[in-house]
Image: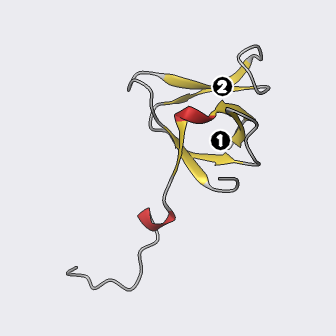
Amino acid sequence: VPGEEHCVVNLPTTGSLNLRQGPGTGYPAHTQLRYAQCGIIVTDDCRGNWCPAEEGHYAGWAYRSYLAMVSPAMYCVTGVAGWD
């Protein structure tokens, strides 16, 4: 989902996801995103299996099967009693 925060998923815990310079494995990687790393923002609509994304220092393309959107409800809970 463009504009939303995503995390790296579906990799071994020691694995990483390449953030590439273009939408395909033929493009070099800017950086690697580690498993469970969050704060990756998908910046526009995906093209096939590749999504434009940025992680704060780099912008590039990430393979969509390794990204999962963070639920806004995970961090923005209001109106709940302290004991609930």
Report whether 53 appears left or right of 17: right
The quadrant in which the C terminus is found is: bottom left
At horizontal 77% and vertical 17% (from top left) the residue drawn is: 27
Q: In the image, is residue 47 above or below residue 19?
A: below
Where residue 75 appears, as percent x and y from the top left, is: 45, 65
Q: Nearer the viewer, residue 58 or 48?
A: 48
Q: Residue at x 61, y 35 (%)?
A: 64
Residue type, numbered disc 2: Thr
Q: Which residue is mark 2?
A: 31
Q: Residue 61 at x, y = what percent?
A: 72, 32
Residue 35 against residue 14 in the figure, above or below: below
The disc at residue 7 is none
Q: Which residue is mark 1?
A: 55
Label 2 Cα neighbours within 10 Å, binned few <14 / some 14-19 / many ≥20: some
User: Separation of disc 2 and disc 1 at Cα?
Assistant: 10 Å
- Percent position (x, y) of residue 65? 55, 33
How many C-alpha atoms fall within 10 Å of the one at disc 1: few (<14), some, or many (≥20)? some
Q: Are marks 2 and 1 in contact (CB under 8 Å)?
A: yes
